[in-house]
Amino acid sequence: MEGYVSKAALGFIYEEFEWSRRFGFAKEDCGCVQMETFGLPCACILAEKRKKKLSILLDEIHPHWRRLCVIGEEDDANFSVMEEWNAIQERVKRAPYKMKLFIKEKLRDLGFPEDTMLKPPPRKVVTKGAPKRVKSTPKTRSTGRIPSRWETIDAQNPNSQCSHAKNNVSKSKGSRLGTCSRSQASTPTSKPKPYLQIPYISKIPHLMRPYIEDIVNVRGDGNCGFRVVARHMGLNEEDHVLVIHALINELKNHKSDYLPIYATERRYKLILDGLHPPTSKSGIVPQEKWLTTPNMGYIIANFYNRVVILLTLPETGGSCETYFPIRSAPPLMPHSNIMCHCLIPDHFLHVKLKENCPLPPL
């Protein structure tokens, strides 16, 4: 399916396949949430195909996830536009003269795209500055005196030094103006955008980069997602254990709110078991104990009454998502109540957003 189905769809299918491989979903336990919402094979379908060693057909993928076909790939020998062309000719015959000229102009644009009716202006149009004023020559007055001989000679030879005073003035002007030429003047250079200096900014989608205030990396031991939650709530990273216990209590105390989301009792139990800490103390948390989305996004949003945002690049096979609390109204101060995660391959980063930032789809 690679090359015919989007990477985001392949990521969803792979995640469901991992669930079916570990737990072996049956039809009555699956709930088919992915099939009903995204139009992609869910865990029970993938488990059946894995058991029978069958491949996934393109017909089982919703057309929304398939690659768009380029216009012109298929060649139809019976393709014709004569019906439309005859209708245009009939309309031209009945149209007024100005309408005929308009239709003819549009047809020329289609038939001769290399030609254009635009012509350069006959002369260069001055678009900057005010028009220069012509310096008028002073009128001779009958009361004006006749210039002396040295004034006449100086007027005929402006580059000559007429007097000591004029020479001093020219020197003082030269000392003030300096000898810097136009080519030596400093030219303004474009400054790099400030957000491009933020570490890990390349892991953020391009649309959201101008709205990023800071990105903080956390320890990558498998608890990185819970460490991001602890940092956002003003705790230390090592207090991620408190976050995990809080999410467990949230899931147990409000089971009736999450069963419609997870569709089946078995899926609810798998997510609850995934929140419990592992029994082994090897230091690296196994993958089934990681924070996963969208399974745990609503749990975090409901318990902390925060809007939770997940940012990830399409190239990694994921999609950006937003989770709102389902038991309370949206926060009154959205900027201070937005918790943002950045998901890179097998790791989470803590992202701090600026005010008036856009939100990914729900």
Image (cartoon, rainbow, N blue to C red):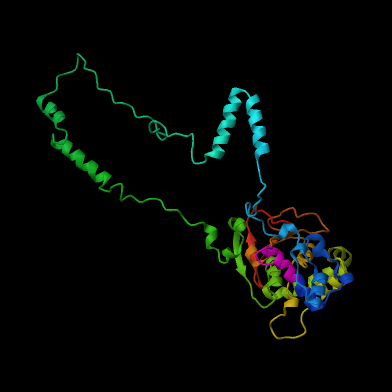
Q: Where, by quadrant of the figure, is residue 314 drawn?
A: bottom right
In the image, 358: left or right of 172?
right
Residue 2 highlighted magenta (yes or no): yes
Does the image show residue 211?
no
The residue that appears at 52% across and 62% down in the rendered structure is 197
Front-lying residue, 340 or 178? 340
Q: Where, by quadrant of the figure, is residue 300 drawn?
A: bottom right
Question: In this picture, is 137 found above or below 261?
Answer: above
Q: What stretch is highlighted in magenta?
A: 1-15
Which quadrant: the C terminus? bottom right
Question: In this picture, is 61 found above or below 48?
Answer: above
Q: Where is residue 335 in the image (x, y as percent from the top left)?
A: 68, 56
Looking at this rendering, what residue extends furthest in the left direction? 149
- Determine the main secondary structure of the stretch shown in magenta: helix
Front-lying residue, 236 or 39? 39
Q: Where is residue 183 in the image (x, y as percent from the top left)?
A: 31, 49
Looking at this rendering, what residue extends furthest in the front direction? 77
Q: Position of residue 155 (x, y in %)?
A: 16, 29
